[in-house]
Amino acid sequence: MLKVENLEVRYGRLAAVRNVSFEVGKGEFVGLIGPNGAGKTSTLAAITGLVSPSAGSVTFDGESLLGRSPEQIVRRGVSLIPEGRQIFGTLTVAENLSLGSTARSDRSTLADDLERELERFPILRTYYDTPAGRLSGGEQQQLAIARALLGQPRMLLLDEPSLGLAPLMIDAVFEVLTHLRDEGVTIVLVEQNAARTIEVADRCYVLRSGEVALTGSSDEILATADVAAAYLGG
Amino acid sequence: MANVIQNIIDALALGSLYALFALGVALIFGIMRLVNFAHGELIMVGAYTVVLVGDVPFVVKVAATLVVAIAAALLMERVAMRPVRDSSPATLLITSFAVSYLLQNLAITIFGSVPKSGQVSSFLSESFNIGSVSISKLDVATVVVTLALMAGLALFLARTPMGVQMRAAAENFRMARLLGVRANRVIAMAFGISGLLAGISAIFLVAQTGTVSPVVGLSPVLFAFMATVLGGLGSLYGAVIGGFLLGAASVALQALLPLGIRGYRDAFLFGAVLAVLVLRPQGLFVPRTAVARI
């Protein structure tokens, strides 16, 4: 479904991503793990059109995503929930959710989908008309996920959804992701929390210094002692 | 007493005008993080339209001015600002200066640097009396139209999908795009509205002064910039309140300064703004998000 080949992303003279290739099949749950600065976030930025890669290719359903704007890419079904949640704090929960539906093509089922997300995250119904900035970090993460789902993504990319959350909230986030996978949503999860990611993902790619250091099914990754080394940057 | 009321009316009318200028600048800054110094030239283009369109019915004159000002704003966005949109704020700022000088010099080339005189409507230059207070219809029109425009803009931003998209883009442009908000569309919309505000500013400006020259936009954009900085860059409400504060301070200085130094009124005004900014560098009504975003 998504195919990234020999991706390279540069910021001036600094190469954040040197040579990253990976594939995600329909319905798969793929983890991208690795230490800080491994190039995970830049990889997601290149896929979603936030930065232009200096080399390599990104194709989704056989069509290249390169040179397309973020607003075009999300309309093709690739939705990113960036690091830090990035909810609109001055806008109400309701307005945040309505913005989530900007990219969807099918408006007839919007009311049903909204109802489903409010069932999934009851806290959002409670604070429906409250400025989203007043929600706690965990509640904002729920809002960010619900908002992205209202765009009817065919593939969901998440960047560090557990960052800065309380342990109970982290459990809740991973539970939601597991549910989404069971519902058939294709997921790419970028995390520093390697152990939890390996637990839920079908397959993982371990990134280090802008390159893929290791790849395999979660079981294979677990069996490889290199994970600890890669994760610790050793 | 009559004097006080007269001054209050003057302050409201001047403040409305400054708020109109400021809102046009604040709207673009909110979304693009660009202080558009060429906003003054949109006012200039509108003012020339008022004068050059000649002796046509009032409604036609207003419509023509608004259409030209909005078209000029959209053109400015498409030709000058869009190509440099992703550049640094400094580049955007210099670009707006360049556009500003270009349009001024274009106006000098086409119309000459000698001011042209014109009239908006003889109706607006009349005044009426309440007791011993003389009120000009232009002042009333300025205040009423400004308040109506602000109410309309507030409704648009709060209630329409496009308005919500614009507020989202102003808070976090990248995230708005990631959700599918079309960058070109919201920015063009912001420029279109700023063109509308510039057109209306131009009508009031010509109605007040009766003249237009290539540099007519310089002073408005200066006051607009001060009002937005005073209110807090990034806040539309701050810009409006900043505009009214500036108007009130200006009228107060005019009334209270001794005759001998009244000519230096604006120096005192700018000094007061500086003093406020020394105490509150972020402005008076700065939104949280403007600080949080880099």
Image: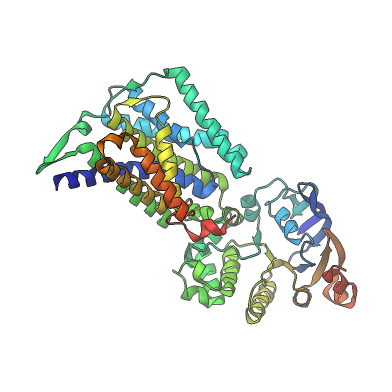
The spot of residue B194 in percent (x, y) is 44, 41
Farthest residue in the bottom direction?
A: A168
* Residue B193 in view in this figure: no
Q: In this rendering, is residue B219 above or below B26?
A: above
Quarter of the image with the C terminus of chain B in it = bottom right
* Residue A144 in view in this figure: yes
Q: Nearer the viewer, residue B204 or A150?
A: B204
Q: Nearer the viewer, residue B58 or B32?
A: B32
The spot of residue B125 in percent (x, y) is 21, 31
| Residue at position x 88%, y 69% in the image | A234
| Residue at position x 68%, y 65% in the image | A158
In the image, is A30 to the left or to the right of B245? right
The spot of residue B43 in percent (x, y) is 40, 33
The spot of residue A78 in percent (x, y) is 67, 58
Q: In this rendering, is residue B40 above or below A96?
A: above
Q: Nearer the viewer, residue A114 or A195?
A: A195
